[in-house]
Image (spheres, helix red, strand yellow):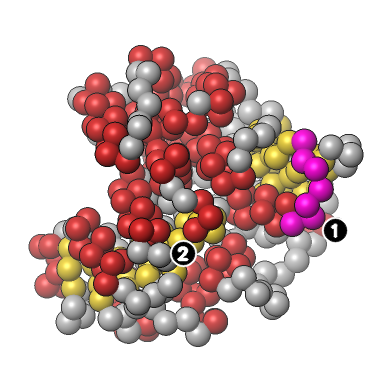
């Protein structure tokens, strides 16, 4: 396989599953964590390695190392692997997804932005989602009963229990205090704003087609998806919080072995569910509209990425991230007619905030 984003949490878990199933790792693509990358190279012996910065090539302990976006696309093109695991963060992940599909490869997708920004131009029949929420929906849909509504769950992020009046003073360090687990900086901010869940609803829309979608907070992150069926029954997908289960199915769909220990409901004792409110998560104001107009995903993604950059550099406050996304959503009325348009719209939205 080709693994994009090998040193992030999804990449690390993918390599654990690859070793478990004896899957050869042909290409490793990583960012700036060269120390961890070098450990992965020793363990998995890839044929090619790609990193973000060419100035750091000298520190990579491999004979065949390249750098930059073009190198990623070329590595996908040259590879003999049938599957590409895309765990890159951000809009950077769209071109590799498109390239992998163009080359006839299957994509195990953890890069939300590929579908959020470019869903209209991605052949989802070539996609296997790695997100636990979409995996949960897929798992439940195997029953093939008539569906009324598909629901995914959210943790609520770092500020789910905060006094609303304090949110305007939230710092970058505050956003990183996730109540359930440790993730990368951007996705933890996205969890705090609930943008992450908005993206996942858009992903679900592209993966499973038109229909009714929603999200709720489940504070222990043990239920990842629910489906309301037309007969009035509801099923839920329970699993202990680990990306290894959806990754295992993406890499080996004939899965017959235990990857996680089952959830012990007696130990859990109780579960708590909450509504996602616009007062705490202002981005939720556009939930219904964006699901009806999923082509506008490229607008909210670009606005989100540039405003997160401004938040990290202390140019804006935490609440301004959502406020500015909503401003861009209202201001721009652009619809891509081809893939190139996606990249032009992305540039235009970013320039709006520069």
Q: Main secondary structure of the magenta part?
A: loop
Q: Within 10 Å of the Cα at label 1, are there few (<14), some (14-19), or many (20+) other Cα atoms?
A: few
Q: Nearer the viewer, residue 100 or 298?
A: 100
For residue 9, say whether it is visible. no
* Residue 31, x across and y down, in percent: 27, 60
* Residue 188, x across and y down, in percent: 46, 43
* Residue 118, x across and y down, in percent: 40, 41
Which element carries disc 2, helix, strand or loop? strand
Q: Earlier in the sequence, mark 2 or mark 1?
A: 2
Compared with residue 141, is residue 71 higher up or lower down, i.e. above or below?
A: below
Bounds of the magenta segment: 142-148
Res. 250 image quadrant: bottom right
For residue 14, say whether it is visible. yes
Q: Residue at x 25, y 62 (%)?
A: 72
Q: Nearer the viewer, residue 281 or 117?
A: 117
Screen quadrant of the N terminus: bottom left
Compared with residue 80, is residue 29 higher up or lower down, i.e. above or below?
A: above
| Relative horizontal placement of residue 179, taking residue 42 as reference (left or right) | right
* Residue 227, x across and y down, in percent: 76, 43
Residue 303 painted magenta:
no
Residue holding disc 1: 266
Compared with residue 321, is residue 86 higher up or lower down, i.e. above or below?
A: below
Q: Nearer the viewer, residue 351 or 78?
A: 78
In the picture, the disc for residue 106 is: 2
Q: Residue at x 10, y 62 (%)?
A: 55
């Amino acid at each position: 396989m080709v693994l994009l984003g090998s040193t992030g949490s999804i990449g690390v878990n993918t390599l654990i599953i690859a070793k478990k199933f004896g899957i050869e790792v042909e290409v490793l693509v990583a960012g700036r964590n060269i120390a961890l990358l070098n450990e992965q190279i020793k363990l998995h012996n890839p044929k090619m390695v790609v990193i973000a910065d060419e100035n750091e090539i000298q520190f990579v302990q491999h004979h065949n190392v390249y750098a930059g976006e073009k190198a990623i696309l070329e590595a996908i093109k040259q590879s003999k692997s049938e599957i590409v695991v895309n765990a890159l963060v951000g809009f950077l992940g769209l071109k590799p997804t498109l390239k992998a599909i163009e080359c006839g490869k299957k994509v195990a997708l953890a890069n939300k932005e590929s579908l959020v920004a470019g869903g209209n131009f991605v052949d989802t029949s070539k996609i296997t989602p790695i997100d636990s929420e979409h995996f949960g929906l897929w798992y439940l849909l195997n029953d093939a009963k008539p569906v009324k509504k598909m629901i995914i769950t959210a943790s609520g992020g770092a500020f789910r229990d905060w006094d609303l009046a304090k949110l305007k003073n939230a710092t970058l360090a505050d956003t990183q205090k996730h109540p359930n687990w440790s993730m990368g900086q951007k996705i933890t901010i996205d969890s705090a704003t609930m943008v992450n869940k908005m993206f996942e609803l858009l992903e679900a829309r592209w993966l499973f087609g038109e229909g009714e979608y929603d999200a709720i907070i489940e504070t222990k992150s043990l239920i990842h998806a629910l489906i309301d069926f037309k007969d009035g029954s509801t099923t839920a997908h329970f699993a202990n919080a680990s990306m290894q289960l959806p990754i295992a199915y993406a890499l080996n769909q004939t899965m017959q072995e235990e990857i996680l220990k089952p959830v012990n409901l007696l130990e859990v004792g109780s579960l708590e569910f909450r509504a996602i409110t616009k007062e705490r998560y202002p981005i939720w104001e556009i939930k219904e509209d964006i699901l009806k107009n999923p082509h506008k995903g490229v607008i909210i993604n670009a606005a989100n990425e540039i405003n997160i950059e401004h938040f990290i550099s202390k140019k804006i406050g935490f609440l301004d991230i959502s406020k500015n996304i909503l401003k861009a959503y209202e201001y721009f009325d652009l619809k891509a007619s081809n893939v190139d348009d996606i990249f032009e719209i992305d540039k235009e939205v970013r320039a709006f905030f520069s």
